[in-house]
Image (cartoon, helix red, strand yellow):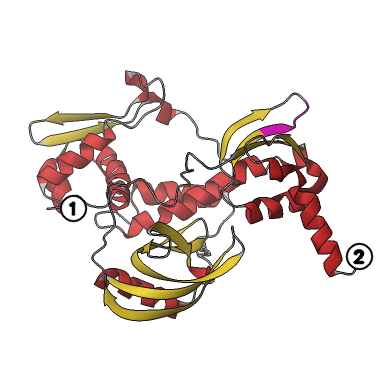
Amino acid sequence: MSAPPAGDRMRRVLAMVPWIVANPGVRLADVAARFELDEKDLLSDLEVVYMVGLPPYSPDSLIDVVYEEDRVWINYADFFSRPLRLTPAQGLALLASTDALLSLTGTEPDGPLARALQKVASSLGMRDDETVDVDLGSAEPALLDLLRTAASEGSEVEIDYYSYGRDEHSTRTIAPWRVLASTGAWYVEAWCHLAEGERIFRVDRIEAARPTGRKSELRADDSAPDALVFHPRRDDPRITIRLEPEAAWVADVYPCESVTIEADARVTATIVVTALPWLERLLVRLGPLVEMVDTSELPEASGLAAAAARRLLRRYGID
């Protein structure tokens, strides 16, 4: 049997741990039956729990799993006995990301996980009949269905795509592997024949899609790192910029290789530039809030914002 996807396994562990804590000494066979596992997979899941804790990972900061014959106990680390203070944003994110766990096999509607979520909701001022809506972007259902079908059947799709970073339109043939939601948008992970490599496409930037009727022998590598995480290439140029305090958000929104907060609250950051049009838009948006510090790997970056501003002015007939 192949290993379950890491995300599915993690959700199962998150649902299982509070139930075992609430039922100390429960039989392993009962846990396996409740969560529809065989005991081998259950023990494999519980091995993950051993590694949960906080630096410096001393015994008092790790979750403890204890076996005695055919029974199991889970003891939270001392850290978990301390009051947890969350900001409203953190509380809402926690509520939105964990509420779906209650639908997993084995969880109790009024169990410890449900009670914890009720407390979080109460602290946020939410009523019992209120729900959290998560916006996953404006992708068309028909397009999502087409891409999911292609991924499940292993077939290719021709798409008309707008690349925001390069500010260009293209038509390309892709072999979809996965359709997934992340950070408020839908994405399709696929092999792109035009790029001759694996690529991630935002579904709401696909302007049209057409099945080709051709099958693809290419398959995703499940052991590869998360494709939605930005992985810069070695030859991508780096630039260093200094941001005024009002523009410090840039260091949180975009991947930075180094970030330094200075005494005057300005932020110096080194960023990777994968496409000039993207950098151009960012610099125009920031205006006087950004200062170039080091552009030795991309000399044209120094005059990029000024050139873009002149082009915009000419469009409006302003010299």
Q: Nearer the viewer, mark 1 or mark 2?
A: 2
Residue 54 locus on image (x, y percent): 40, 27
Query: Would you say residue 227 sits in the magenta stretch?
Result: no
Nearer the observer, 2 or 62? 2
| Mark drawn on residue 176 | none
Relative image position of residue 194 (x, y in whole percent): 42, 65
Q: Which residues are magenta?
A: 264-268
Query: Which sits earlier in the primary sequence, circle 1 or circle 2?
Result: 1
Looking at this view, is 171 or 80 the one in front? 171
What's the distance in space between the residues labelled 1 and 2, CA to CA?
71 Å
Tell me residue 159's x, y (percent).
45, 74
Q: Is residue 132 left or right of residue 68?
A: right
Q: Is residue 86 above or below residue 282?
A: above
Query: What residue is shown at x 16% (from left), y 55% (from top)?
Result: 36
Q: What secondary structure prevails in the magenta region?
A: loop
**Total marks in image:** 2
Q: Is 149 left, or right, of 205 in this rendering?
A: left
Q: Quick one: SS at disc 1?
A: helix
Pointer 1: what residue?
A: 34
Q: Residues within 10 Å of mark 2 (few under 14, many from 20)?
A: few
Instruction: Report which residue position mark 2 lands on.
Output: 318
User: Of the residues shown, which amino acid type is indicated by label 2?
Assistant: Ile
Image quadrant where residue 143 sits = bottom left
